[in-house]
Amino acid sequence: MSKKLTATVAGVVVLGVLVLGALVIVVTHMPSDSRIGAMVRDGSPSATGDVGINDGMIATGESISPFADDHPAIANLDADLRAAMQDAARDAISDG
């Protein structure tokens, strides 16, 4: 895989993680009577509607490895997406 393609794939993965993080922040700060917030919260694993580590939340300033299969943010990803992200990370590591 070329360095340019690897860099592009790694950039897309990073962008996806940032978008996911932004979505978590937006949902957690919605008023509880918000219709969208209520739908997301009702469908979340947390019965209280609070988003936490078990939902895949990554705290502000925290970073996790794309290989942290024990962390819900990684473990709960679609298997194909997780594999692609980990492949891109391996390629980025090997390219230095």
Image (spheres, rainbow, N blue to C red):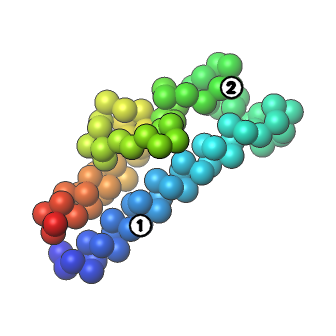
Give the residue at x 60% y 30%.
Answer: 51
Give the residue at x 65% y 26%.
Answer: 50
Residue at which label 2 appears: 49
Residue at which label 1 appears: 12
Give the residue at x 30% y 36%.
Answer: 69
Q: Quadrant of the N terminus?
A: bottom left
User: For mark 1, does the 10 Å Cα neighbourhood hold few (<14), some (14 to 19), or many (20 or more) residues?
Assistant: some
Residue 67 place in picture, x, y as percent: 26, 43
Residue 39 shows up from this direction? yes
> What's the residue type where badge 1 is placed?
Val
Q: Is residue 11 left or right of residue 83?
A: right
* In contact (CB < 8 Å): disc 2 and disc 1: no
Residue 87 place in picture, x, y as percent: 23, 57
Residue 10 place in picture, x, y as percent: 33, 65
Q: Quadrant of the C terminus?
A: bottom left
The image's mark for residue 20 is none
